[in-house]
Image (spheres, helix red, strand yellow):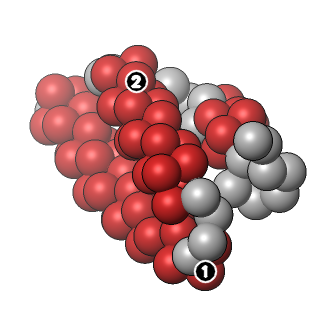
Amino acid sequence: MSVDGPLDGGASRASLGGASNGVPPSPGGAEVSASLEGLVSALDSLKQSLGYDDYSAVERLVKDLRDENAEIRGYAESAIREAQRLQES
């Protein structure tokens, strides 16, 4: 069974690359992307096991995961900038 739309796996995976958002790749970015791809894969499995009966709950989970990812990414980018600043001084 496949679902087209905001939760389809291909669209989710395509947004993980980071290159299109104007932020240059950072150290550890490949590991973060691999981890996020694992989360998306787990979410795909969850959607399949739910049979898409509770689509709104899955959408909320995806939103929460994306919000948390954005927050963690912000902390990581800030830490990288600070480390670079300290290294330069």
Label 1 neighbourhood size at 10 Å, few (<14), some (14-19), many (20+)?
few
Residue at position x 36%, y 65% in the image: 68
Residue 56, label in figure: 1
Image quadrant for the C terminus?
A: top left
- Which residue is at the front of the view, 84 or 77? 77
Q: Is residue 87 above or below residue 67?
A: above
Image quadrant for the N terminus?
A: top right
Residue at position x 18%, y 37% in the image: 83
Residue 45 location in percent, x, y? Answer: 47, 42
> Which residue type carries mark 1?
Ser
Which residue position is annotated with label 2?
34
Looking at the image, tell me whether mark 2 or mark 1 is earlier in sequence order: 2
Residue 35 location in percent, x, y? Answer: 34, 31
Whether residue 36 appears in this view of the structure is no
- Which residue is at the front of the view, 8 or 19? 8
> Which residue type carries mark 2?
Ala
For the residues bearing labels 2 and 1, Cβ distance under 8 angstroms = no
Mark 2: which secondary structure?
helix
Q: Is residue 29 rendered to the left or right of residue 57?
A: left
Residue 69 location in percent, x, y? Answer: 39, 56
